[in-house]
Image (spheres, rainbow, N blue to C red):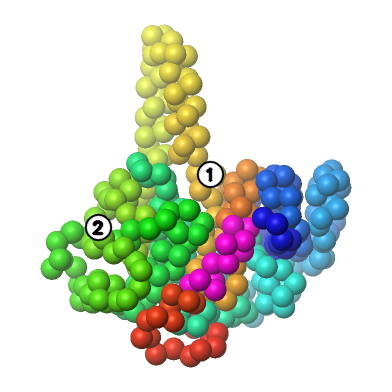
Amino acid sequence: MSEEIVLALDAMGGDQGPEMVVKGANIARVRYPDLRFILFGDETAIRPVLDRFKKLNSVSTVRHTEEAVQSDEKLRVVLRQRRNSSMSLAVDSVGKGEAHGVVSAGNTGALMAFSKLVLKTLPGIDRPAMGSIFPTKRGESVMLDLGANIDCNSNHLVQFAIMGEVFARNVLGVTEPTVGLLNIGSEEGKGNNTIRTAAATLRQSDLPIKFHGFIEGDDIAAGTVDVVVTDGFAGNIALKTAEGAARLYGGYIRSAFKRSVMSRAGYLLARPALKMLRERLDPRTYNGAMFLGVNGVAVKSHGGTDHKGFANALSVAADMVAQGINPKIIEDLSRMNFEDSAEPKRAAI
């Protein structure tokens, strides 16, 4: 990056609060020297941590508020009573043009609601989608939606495909990303009318998208396509299943190496390879879910991550800003025949 990028941080979000946020920002500052930060939250909790990092302190501003969104608060309560919270004010700063993007490890539903309410949606986008990067056999892929939209029509899926393709091309660096629709089978006649209509639209469009067709669940980890498109219901189940499987096999491996003296000796020999495997599958490496489709950059960090994971969420936000993701999404969407307003619009919360 050669131009200054300002990120608004919800310093009170996540299980570890300001400690994790500040330390993560310090890692991101080293990676991206042009980053600047506005930290929103309780200054009495933020300042003692921030003062330990002189260089970070010099590129950071603290905006004090004692109000914060709790992880288990209901959405209607948040929207009515938490407009002065650290999360809401951080999103507001993007809407006012003070920051280029917002990152929070707080309540997912609240962050999406504030983002849609304040930032609105991009022209041509009916519903923003939550996407994330997945490790695959071939490298990395992006999958969306992961839970923001339970019920989708064919236009929504096409919009998700366009947004995911732009992200893969510009952030993941894939020259010609392939796009697949997650289905119960790869055959052309499989699936419901919604997914079949979306497939037909993508095949017939003039967009420069390499549409692979339908893919199945095992194609996600295989890396059959660079962009996996699905509704939020199936996407969230796939995400949680993958996370659970990773924890299961990690537990199996640890138990196997503790079983006997010989297995513990085998662990010593295998330790370098296991270290590589652990780093490849470390969820912190892929932390940072993007809210694609909002008229601004908003990234959700996992609430239970540590400072290393939060730093990676900041990297995702910085890359999205630096690569100008939203203008490129608008450009591709303008080629479709969706009947949408030319101006950003409010999305239903």
The residue lying toward the viewer, choosing from 217 and 243, is 217
Q: Indicate whether residue 318 is drawn in magenta.
A: yes
Quarter of the image holding residue 98?
A: bottom right
Is residue 67 placed above or below 80 in the rendered structure? Answer: above
Is residue 211 placed above or below 77 in the rendered structure? Answer: above
Which secondary structure type mostly characterizes the magenta part of the structure?
helix
The three-letter code of the residue at mark 1 reads Thr
> Alpha-carbon neighbours of circle 1 within 10 Å: few (<14), some, or many (≥20)?
some
Q: Residue at x 47, y 20 (%)?
A: 271
Q: Residue at x 57, y 76 (%)?
A: 295
| Residue occupied by mark 2 | 215
Task: Name the disc covering residue 77, or none.
Answer: none
Task: Write down the region rendered in magenta.
Answer: 317-329
Q: Residue at x 37, y 76 (%)?
A: 156
Q: Is residue 347 left or right of residue 46?
A: left
Quarter of the image holding residue 93?
A: bottom right
Quarter of the image holding residue 113?
A: bottom right
> Alpha-carbon neighbours of circle 2 within 10 Å: few (<14), some, or many (≥20)?
many
Which image quarter is the N terminus in? Answer: bottom right
Q: Position of residue 300 (x, y in %)?
A: 57, 60
The residue lying toward the viewer, choosing from 285 and 237, is 285
Ranked by sequence position, the earlier of labels 2 and 1 is: 2
The three-letter code of the residue at mark 2 reads Ile
Q: Residue at x 76, y 58 (%)?
A: 36
The residue lying toward the viewer, choosing from 304 and 221, is 221
| Residue occupied by mark 1 | 285
